[in-house]
Amino acid sequence: MSELPPFNETRPANRSGAWVAPVVLIGLGVIFLLQNFGYLYLHNWWALFILLGTVGAWGTAWRIYQSNGNRVTSQVTGAFIGGLFPLAVALIFLFDWNWGTLWPIFLIILGIAILVRPMTHSN
């Protein structure tokens, strides 16, 4: 049988991405608390869960950025800009904005992605 590590043993210092889940929970808690006290009203509160796609994409962008020696590459910008799409969808649902008015946002995000791509390193 393998032995368990001592209780007071510290965790490894490099826990990249381990902060994402707690920050998401804290953010959701703050939003729901503000809503319960009447400071914020979100008609479609379930759209907060669409933001998980944004958090995941931006977490991936951060990990790639760190693994490439803190260099912005096309993979980093691709993951970051990819997170903008679920962010836009979530905000439109959360604030009950008109899709017919705001659909050009997706064209803008796509245009930014195409514009930024040549400015980044190819790795």
Image (tube, rainbow, N blue to C red):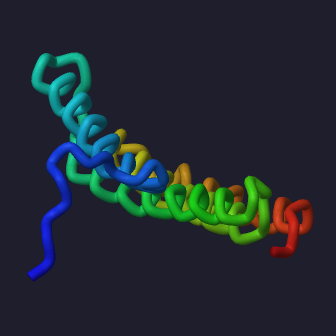
Q: Is residue 2 left or right of residue 99?
A: left
Residue 77 at x, y = what percent? Answer: 71, 61
Q: Depth check: 105 or 39 in front? A: 39
Instruction: Please name whichever residue, 123 or 109, is drawn nearer the observer in this view of the structure.
Output: 123
Quadrant of the rendered image containing residue 96? top left
90 relative to 75, above or below: above
Q: Quadrant of the N terminus?
A: bottom left
Q: Residue furthest bottom?
A: 1
Q: Is residue 116 visible?
A: yes
At horizontal 26% and vertical 36% (from top left) the residue drawn is 26
Q: Position of residue 43 (x, y in %)?
A: 22, 40
Along the viewing direction, whichever of 116 and 47 lies nearer the viewer: 116
* Residue toward you, 70 or 3: 3
Residue visible at 21% across and 52% down in the picture? 46
Q: Is residue 97 above or below residue 103?
A: above
Residue at horizontal 41 percent and vertical 44 percent from the top: 97
In-image side of 94 versus 29 (left or right): right
Identify the residue at horizontal 33%, vertical 51% (top origin). 11
Q: Is residue 97 above or below residue 121?
A: above
- Where residue 123 sits, quadrant-wise, is bottom right
Q: Position of residue 74 (x, y in %)?
A: 77, 69
Residue 28: x percent and y percent? 24, 39
Report the side of 92 relative to 121 (left or right).
left
